[in-house]
Every structure is written in C-alpha cells, then in structure tokens.
Image (spheres, rainbow, N blue to C red):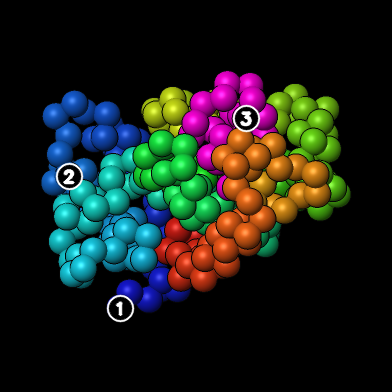
Amino acid sequence: MINTKRQPPVSTTTLPVLMEAIADRAATAASVASVVGHDPGLAARVLALANSSQFGLCRRVTDLAQAVTVVGTGVVQTLAIANAAALVDTSGFVADAHGHAVRVAIAARLLAPAAGVHPDDAFAAGLLHDIGELLLLQDSPSEYARLHATFETHADQLRTEKQVFGTDHALAGAEHLLDWRVPDVIADAVADHHDPFHASAPTTIVVAAADELISAETGRHHALDLLELDVAAADGLRDRVATEAGALTGLVGG
C-alpha cells in the first residue's frame, strides 16, 4: 500500500515534457508512462489513483503503463497540473482548495452519465475547476489569501477578483490550461463553471452542478436543476462523495 504522505511532490519540470508526450499523435500509454516514470511523485499518484475506488479494476494495477491506460492520459495530465500548482503555495490555503477540488471531481464523475459526458473529462475538469485561485494566489499570496477569506458568495468572489486583479479565477485558470494544451472541453468547463448557461456545454453543466452540490451555496442550484437531480438523489450523492473523498484527497493533493 502506498503511503501518500511520503509521496514527493510532482515536479514542475515534468509538466512541459509530459505535455509534449501527450500531444504527440503517436503517443501510447507506454510512451506517456516512460515520462511519468521519471517523476516518482507523479508515478506514485497515477498508480494509486488507478487502484482507487474511482478507477480500480478487479485486480491490482502494478504496471505504470497499464495504470496510464486505466486513468487515461487526460487524468495523468490533470494530476501533474494540480500537484505542480500546489508547489507555489506558502500558506494553508491550498489544503482547503484541494479538498474542495477533489470532492467536486468525484461528484462530477458521478454526475457525468446523466449528461452523456465522459467520466474522465468530468473528473479532470472538476479537479481543475478552481486552479485559477492557485494562480492568483501565486501572483499575490498575502492579498489573495486575505481577500478569499472575505468572499461570501461566488458572485462576490468573481466581482472582487476582477476589480483587484483584472480577471477572475475561472478565466485565469482556463487561459493557463489552454496554454498547457489541456483539451478545450476541460478549459471551457473551467472558464464557465460559475456561468454554465454561457455555453450550455454538457461538461460545463456537470462541473457547475458538482460545484453547486459540494458548495451548497444558498439559492445556487441552476446547473443541478438542469440535471433534474432531486433532493434525495443529491443527498445520496453528497454522502457517496464524502465516503470516497478522504482517500482520494491524499492522492491528488498530498
């Protein structure tokens, strides 16, 4: 059993090499695994995630190439980005951010079939949906951490971020993800997860619904309404997310 607390952080130098490997049209699970294998932190997380309840098969996965096949190159890329982003944190802010991201990712994956969305896309977009917060934190650590503590609603957050930084975390995250060659469907979901009606793309709606479900912000259930999720189903989903989030948080945010 992998001890996630001892996993080294994913190196930021891995990102450009991994992006190039995944972008190669001739890329295979083996070629991506060869890059991942040079980064002990990322390799450990990919193997652990492949054996988690989210992706786990009936038998244990021990081969890295097989693990890449199980979780998909998109999720491998997502893990690398999410963990590299955490390296810039100098406060306790990122722990809460990652915990929330993992819960939204799990919820999005569970909601995906209802909207005809690929579960891996939903999981990746859910995990990255607030990465813009970490980017704004990197730019202005003290100021952003202080401001974030004052946000009462997501609308207040977006408005304040634009006033202070000239952009908001959703747009900042999406722009960087596109620079990192993350698929458009995921970047679009990140850009519009607070405004799912802007594009009405299924992946965006799923991520927005998952964020609404986990955030439980009063009066904010527009995307959940689109998925026609009743109260009982929503409560059951929250319980399932809570059950699965503990172990997974250590894998993608530790």
Q: Is residue 195 magenta?
A: yes
Q: Is residue 206 toward the left or the right of residue 232 in the image?
A: left
Disc 2 residue type?
Ala
Which residues lie in the magenta part? 190-210
What residue is drawn where x is 71% and y is 42%?
A: 221
Label placed on residue 1: 1
Residue sitting farthest toward the top: 199
Q: Is residue 27 toward the left or the right of residue 152 in the image?
A: left
Q: Is residue 219 toward the left or the right of residue 66 in the image?
A: right
- In the displayed structure, 38 sits above or below 20; it is below
Element marked by disc 3: loop
Label placed on residue 171: none
Disc 3 residue type?
Pro
- In the displayed structure, 144 sits above or below 250; it is above
What residue is drawn where x is 46% and y is 52%?
A: 110
- Which residue carries the number 2 mark? 29
What residue is drawn where x is 62% and y is 30%?
A: 196
Answer with mark 1 or mark 3, whichever residue precedes in sequence.
1
- Report the mark closest to the observer, 3 or 2: 3
Q: Distance from label 2 to label 1 (Cα)? A: 23 Å
Q: Is disc 1 surrounded by few (<14), some (14 to 19) or many (20+) residues within 10 Å?
A: few
Q: Distance from label 1 to label 3 (Cα)? A: 40 Å
Image coordinates for residue 61, horizontal then vertical, percent: 20, 65
Disc 1 residue type?
Met
Answer with mark 2 or mark 1, whichever residue precedes in sequence.
1
Image coordinates for residue 32, horizontal then vertical, percent: 21, 43
- Quick check: marks 2 and 1 in contact, CB under 8 Å? no
Q: Distance from label 3 to label 2 (Cα)? A: 33 Å
Element marked by disc 1: loop
- Which residue carries the number 3 mark? 196
